Amino acid sequence: MKFGVFCPFHTHLRGYKECFDRQAALVRRAEDLGFDEAWVAEHHFNPNGASSSILVLLGHLATITSRIRLGSAALLLAYRNPIQAAEDIATVDIISNGRLNLGVARGGSATLPNKHFHVPREQSRDMLIEGLTLVERLLYEDHVTFAGDHFAVDDVSLVPKPLQRRIPTFLATTAPDAIRYAASRGLGTMAAPPYSMERVRQTIDHYRAAAPGADPGMTLSRFFFAAPSREEALNETLPQIRSFVDRKRALALADVPVSPSELNIESVIERSLIGSYEDVIEKLNYLEENMQIRAVLLRPMTIEHDRSIRALDRFVRYIQPKLQFA
């Protein structure tokens, strides 16, 4: 199991420049500590989310790091022209010296992006799959001609091409048809922090059923904060967890599908890596023993930059050495 950091680029209403600087510093610290990967979220029209230009941010992170792999979690392809997306993906892969991991998703529950990008929610998954099919052809083939329901190109040869022969690509979804598509293409899978372990297991099971013996490449993001005691960890993270639950409740009131477990603080804590060092060690050992997880991405659940850095330091010092599989 690999370990990485998940960077939501939340401003916490402190200014965009400060947000960029702090998230960049977190990634640099993660690299210094030996973390394997750093992934960036994509948000649009969200005052607390500064990562609308996700590939620009990944290009920046590529220039200030040298070893850690960098991922998009996730690029919302339904909102992009596939040719331009492929050009940007290839460029970031070159800038990073072949360190890009490509995660993609539909972004279907975000009301404002669907409205402003003119993407009907009921079409976003089909647009994602069709867009990804075209992007992959553009990245790895020449003279691409394609005619789909949403996108079409005629004899396009992409310039530049990516450095990696095949960029590791992951699909963030729980829809069975999309999971089958990922399995048929040899793509990995992703699960966001709100996903329950039941949903993660269902994703893995659907993948294995579609491609027996194949590795689902599950990349699992989890809210994270560990401290000497569970009480200390909860005192630090409860305000952020309450804020998360409040946002989910607002989506539910707006008639956006939300899992009931995402509306309950206790459920969110239970499926997070939050608690004492021993609590987090036990949960990670469970994941290794019972689930086929490629990588776990830690999202520090604190608004204070120094505490986010300390959370990563504590993970490497007090948790990672005591894992049964380390």
Image (tube, helix red, strand yellow):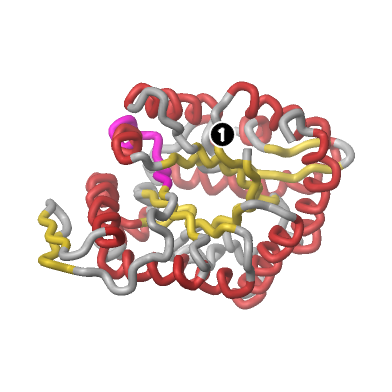
Is residue 99 at least partly visible in the picture?
Answer: yes
Res 154 quadrant in image: bottom left
Left or right? Give the position of 162 relative to 9.
left
Mark 1, residue position: 293
Residue nearest the viewer, comparing 186 with 220: 186
Q: Which image quarter is the N terminus in?
A: top right
- Is 173 included in the stretch rendered in magenta? yes
Q: Does residue 282 lie above or below 248 as drawn? A: above
Query: Disc count in the image?
Result: 1
Q: Secondary structure at mark 1?
A: strand
- For the point 54% across and 29% down, which residue is it? 292
Q: Which residues are magenta?
A: 170-178
- Please give the name of the residue rendered at 13% of the width and 52% of the height, measured from the top-left corner: 148
| Residue drawn at (48%, 55%) of the image | 101
Task: Kindly tell me whether residue 13 is visible in this rendering.
Answer: no
Task: Classify 314 as above or below 195.
Answer: below
Q: Neighbour class for label 1 at 10 Å: few (<14), some, many (≥20)?
A: many
Tell me what residue is drawn at x 52 percent, y 61 percent. 99
